[in-house]
Image: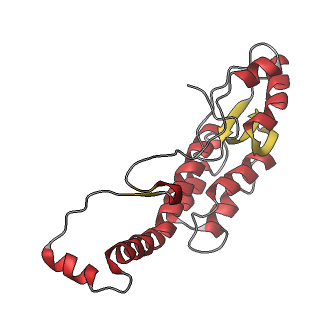
Amino acid sequence: MSVPSDLPVVAFVGADRIVAPRPLHRALPALHAAAAAGKGPLVFSLADGRVVDLDLRGGVGEARARLGPALAPTETRGPGRPKLGVTAREVTLLPRHWDWLAAQPGGISVALRKLVEAQMKAGEGPERARRAKERAYRFMTAMAGDLPNYEEATRMLFAGDWTAFDAAVEGWPEGVRETAREMAEGAWRNGAG
């Protein structure tokens, strides 16, 4: 499976962060150099905290050629207003729902769009926090599972307690600590992110 060339990544050799957050195509020379020196870099996706498997054989150009294209929005065509990104789909509602929608200012389509947007915003905070917790947990499990206070940091991550999490990771190697904090951003009810 190819990896998108613009995937944001961070990389480590042991506990040392050798690549600060940046797109994969920009990180590739440092990753290739570490692999060529026999250091076996561990690369993490900043999007989801998973380890990224790369084929770093050959030259940097060869490794770059094996990367996938940059992530691009998918384009769909069909009924609706495709140039505006609008697609028509069937919705089944009870008659009282149709009556209420029809009575709303702007009509049925505007009312449905407003309802969907409101629900998306309402769920954004909890969903963002869930993704941040999962991303940080994946990273921490791979990089910090043997470090002091790992269990406490994990508990505080899922409890959403920034202050206690921050204290638990304080003794970790700098790159691991800072990356865990960065990946956990957005998971908190009391402080950072």
Q: Residue at x 76, y 38 (%)?
A: 15
Asked which quadrant contains residue 14, the reply is top right
Seen in the picture, residue 45 relative to 135 is either above or below; the reply is above
Seen in the picture, residue 189 relative to 31 is either above or below; the reply is below
Q: Is residue 173 visible?
A: no
Q: Is residue 139 visible?
A: yes
Viewer-proximal residue, 27 or 98?
98
Seen in the picture, residue 158 relative to 75 is either above or below; the reply is below
- Residue 143 left/right relative to 30: left
Screen quadrant of the C terminus: bottom right
x, y percentage for residue 37?
85, 18
Q: Residue at x 63, y 52 (%)?
A: 149
Say how many tags the image has: 0
Screen quadrant of the N terminus: top right
x, y percentage for residue 130?
49, 58
x, y percentage for residue 69?
65, 33
- Residue 150 left/right relative to 21: left
Q: Residue at x 68, y 62 (%)?
A: 166
Q: Residue at x 78, y 46 (%)?
A: 175
Viewer-proximal residue, 179 or 87?
87
x, y percentage for residue 13?
78, 31
Viewer-proximal residue, 61 or 10?
61
Residue at the left extreme of this rendering: 95
